[in-house]
Amino acid sequence: VQLQASGGGLVTAGESLRLSCAASERTFSDLVMAWFRQAPGQEREFVAVISSTGGTTFYTESTKGRFTISRDNARNTGYLQIHSLEPADTGVYYCAASSSRHSYLSSLKRRTRNTYEFWGQGTQVTVSS
């Protein structure tokens, strides 16, 4: 499965963005999907994850309330809606997917990069103050 992330850009603090992750195959609906981000000079960190059906989501504490992960399996696309963007949100956002259907249930696994075998190329989000 190939993933294509898009929707990033240069925005002003307080604005919103919706990132998209388009999958190349219908098997996307069988995959757990997640978003990670990597700030300049930092490690890539977990942001949010959604189950294959879209019924369950988890977020890292720093993004709760402002980030919403969702998916449309009919369109083979996942999304990350970000509200009230802050300069600290600046970075490259990556979508990822895992064939391990229950991986999102483990707090450790869902945050671990190795859990996800499919990765998009990343989309840059830059937030100016």
Image: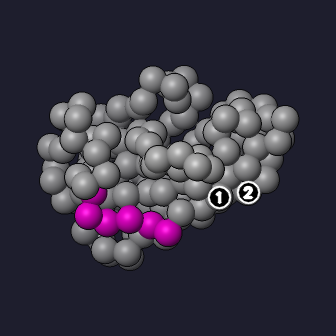
In the image, the segment drawn in magenta is 116-121
Report whether residue 40 is seen: yes
Q: Are marks 1 and 2 in contact (CB under 8 Å)?
A: yes
29 or 58: nearer the eye?
A: 58
Quarter where residue 107 is shown: top left
Q: Is residue 105 left or right of residue 73?
A: left
* Position of 23 relative to 73 (above/below): below
Q: Is residue 32 highlighted in magenta? A: no
Q: Residue at x 15, y 43 (%)?
A: 102
Of the numbered discs in the image, which one, if any, rests on residue 124? 1
**Horizontal and vertical percent for residue 71?**
42, 50
Q: Residue at x 54, y 58 (%)?
A: 20
13 or 24: nearer the eye?
A: 13
Q: Is residue 64 left or right of residue 59?
A: right
**Disc 1 from disc 2: Cα separation:** 6 Å
Of the numbered discs in the image, which one, if any, rests on residue 25? none
Of the numbered discs in the image, which one, if any, rests on residue 9? 2
Report whether residue 29 is seen: no
Q: Residues within 10 Å of mark 1 (few under 14, many from 20)?
A: many
Which of the image's four quarters has the C terminus? top right
Q: Residue at x 31, y 52 (%)?
A: 113
* Position of 67 relative to 97 (above/below): above
Q: Residue at x 35, y 32 (%)?
A: 58
**Horizontal and vertical percent for residue 18?**
62, 49
